[in-house]
Image (tube, grey):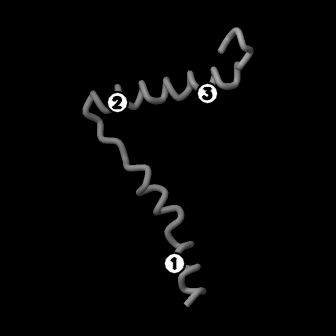
Amino acid sequence: MWKQKKTKELWILALVTLLISVLGTVKSLGINLPNPLDMLSAILGPYPRAVYSLLQ
């Protein structure tokens, strides 16, 4: 990648690798991580219900 001048892809790969390493280390230390789907449903929770009520 470096020789092909794909620095953007290289940075993304490095960041994803770092994120996975940090999450794996935190998980191995026994720290409970929140479920990302819970946060997503809390943020987007009212919108699907509003759309559903409009469609009925």
The residues bearing labels 1 and 3 have C-alpha atoms spaced at a distance of: 36 Å
Q: Nearer the viewer, residue 2 or 42?
A: 2
Question: At 30% from the left edge and 41% from the top edge, which residue is drawn?
Answer: 32
Q: Nearer the viewer, mark 1 or mark 2?
A: 1
Crowd rating for badge 3 (residues with CA inside 10 Å; few <14, some 14–19, many 20+): few
N-terminal-most mark, 1 or 3? 3
> According to the image, label 3 marks what residue?
12
Q: Nearer the viewer, mark 1 or mark 3?
A: 3
> According to the image, label 1 marks what residue?
49
What is the three-letter code of the residue carrying label 1?
Arg
Q: Quadrant of the C terminus?
A: bottom right
* As drawn, 42 above or below 33: below
| Quadrant of the rendered image containing residue 54 | bottom right
Q: Secondary structure at mark 3?
A: helix
Circles 3 and 2: CB atoms closer than 8 Å: no
Q: Secondary structure at mark 1?
A: helix
Question: At 49% from the left edge and 24% from the top edge, which residue is drawn?
Answer: 17
Crowd rating for badge 2 (residues with CA inside 10 Å; few <14, some 14–19, many 20+): few
* As drawn, 43 above or below 25: below
N-terminal-most mark, 3 or 2? 3
Residue 36 place in picture, x, y as percent? 43, 50
Q: How many marks?
A: 3
* As drawn, 2 above or below 47: above
Residue 7 place in picture, x, y as percent? 70, 19
Q: Nearer the viewer, residue 33 or 56?
A: 56
What is the three-letter code of the residue carrying label 2?
Val
Q: Nearer the viewer, residue 7 or 3?
A: 3
> According to the image, label 2 marks what residue?
26
Question: At 56% from the left edge and 26% from the top edge, which residue is drawn?
Answer: 15
Q: Nearer the viewer, mark 3 or mark 2?
A: 3
Residue 48 place in picture, x, y as percent? 53, 73
